[in-house]
Amino acid sequence: MQKKKSYYSHILYIAIPMIIQNLITNFVSMLDNIMVGQIGTCQMSGVSIVNQFIFVFNISIFGAISGAGIFGCQFFGKQNHEGQKHTFRFRLLFASLICILGLCIFIFFGDNLIQLFLSKDDSPELIAQTLHYGQEYLSIIIYSLIPFAIGQVYCSVIRECQETKIPMYAALSALFFNLFLDYSLIFGKFGFPQLGVAGAAVATVIAKIIEAFVMIIWAHTHIERNKYLVGAYRHLFHIPSDLCKQMILKSIPLLMNEFLWSFGMSVIAQCYSVRGLEVVAARNIASTLTNLFGVVYIQFGSAAGILVGNKLGAGLFDEAIDDANHLMPFVCFVTAIVALIMVPVGIAFPKIYQTTATIKALASFIIIVQAIAMPFWSYANSSYFILRSGGKIGITILFDSGFTWLIVIPLSFILTRFTNLSIEMIVVLITIADGLKAITGYFLVKSKMWVNNIVN
């Protein structure tokens, strides 16, 4: 019994600051979304469409640093600071490359991407306004890509050292500025100009810069707790060739996995969009709340991956297996409680928006369905991080993005385009299909194929 308590207290110590950090980020995004929603449906839809692309970029950055993060996590468990230094350099360089690529895509192909989400069934005026607001938002939000990427590099290496409170403090530091600037610039308060969706983008850019700046300053002023930073920039391009090759072999597939998964989510959103801008708006409202509540299970899964990865790096295989066996059901249980809270909130939340009754009703329905599915999503998410912690990238890809592209996307494409089913029934069927991934995750984790040390 005492041992079980130590499992739970340890993951709570690691996970709670991570949850708070991401709750702050998603809470600010939610308020940002609500404020834009007060202006009008076209503005909200335009911002929502662009944020689909930003989501793909953000997840791609996560994938780019994840491969090296597996090594970094195990190096920390082994107390090999030199190895951590090399993984830090690799992450910084790889994330910079993704930034350059992302900027080029958004600058040269942004308009075409937005138009993919505009249904021809809507009125030309509605389409033109949504496109305009999307372009306006995208032209500014791209300046947040660089500080976000650098911030994520520092966040990942700080977290793997189990210093999870620092990213939380960084998010708190950016909170006030984001909320104040959102309100001031969107509505023109306190002497600021009324910029609408452009104001929301400006506020987000400034907040991302502040958040990254806080983590960077802390890391470089606490060298005794971040020994991997000693001389890290002096020879930035010096990474042992064997280790670099191994990290590339892990990072490229993980980057492709995260890109394919996040791009898959955008493809599913595009499938829904053929049913009209009302569906786009309803899913935007629903995803705002789902993302806020979903932070709990996502960060618990990430914390479980850190703990298991540290044990694998130290060669404590039996303890790593025990951690996985105890932590995954615990995360699922906590998520079930969160989902119960989410249901009544989901019924009331869409009423905040200045939009039609049809959109509000559909948004509430989507939220309730997703709340029911959340415990299954949490188990699948924990399975993903456990599998990844042992470096089993091929299996991880098949389990994650493979499942999305082979099952969920074809189903979404067929249901939205070739059936007369109501949008409510389509939401239910697609959500059930996505939740089935938890069953696959159960058997993969139980197989123990992930029990592996990759830094010896």
Image (cartoon, grey):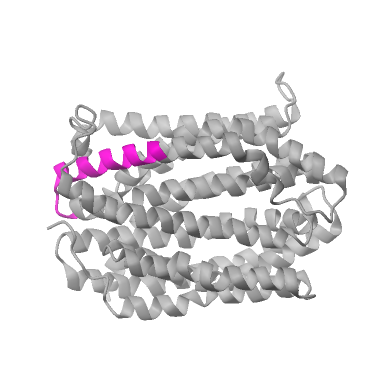
The overriding secondary structure of the stretch rendered in magenta is helix
Q: Quick one: which residue is furthest to the top in this view? A: 191
Q: Against 185, is 437 above or below?
A: below
List x then y, in percent, for residue 256. Answer: 42, 55
Can residue 113 be seen here? The reply is: yes
Q: Nearer the viewer, residue 363 or 46?
A: 46
- Image point (46%, 68%), residue name: 402
Q: Is residue 31 magenta?
A: no
Quadrant of the drawing holding the N terminus:
bottom left
Q: Nearer the viewer, residue 350 or 279?
A: 279
Viewed as shown, does residue 321 lie left or right of 57?
left
List x then y, in percent, for residue 431. Answer: 61, 72
Q: Against 416, is 60 above or below?
A: above
Quadrant of residue 78 within the rendered picture: bottom left
Quadrant of residue 309 within the rendered picture: bottom left
Can residue 169 be seen here? The reply is: no
Quadrant of the drawing holding the C terminus:
bottom left
Q: Nearer the viewer, residue 427 or 337?
A: 427
Viewed as shown, does residue 214 lie left or right of 284?
left
- Image point (57%, 54%), residue name: 292
Q: Nearer the viewer, residue 187 or 43?
A: 43
Magenta segment: 77-97
List x then y, in percent, for residue 280. Answer: 73, 55
- Count of numbered circles in the view: 0
Q: Quick one: which residue is furthest to the left in this view? A: 456
Q: Against 229, is 423 above or below?
A: below
- Image point (70%, 62%), residue name: 272
List x then y, in percent, for residue 334. Answer: 47, 68
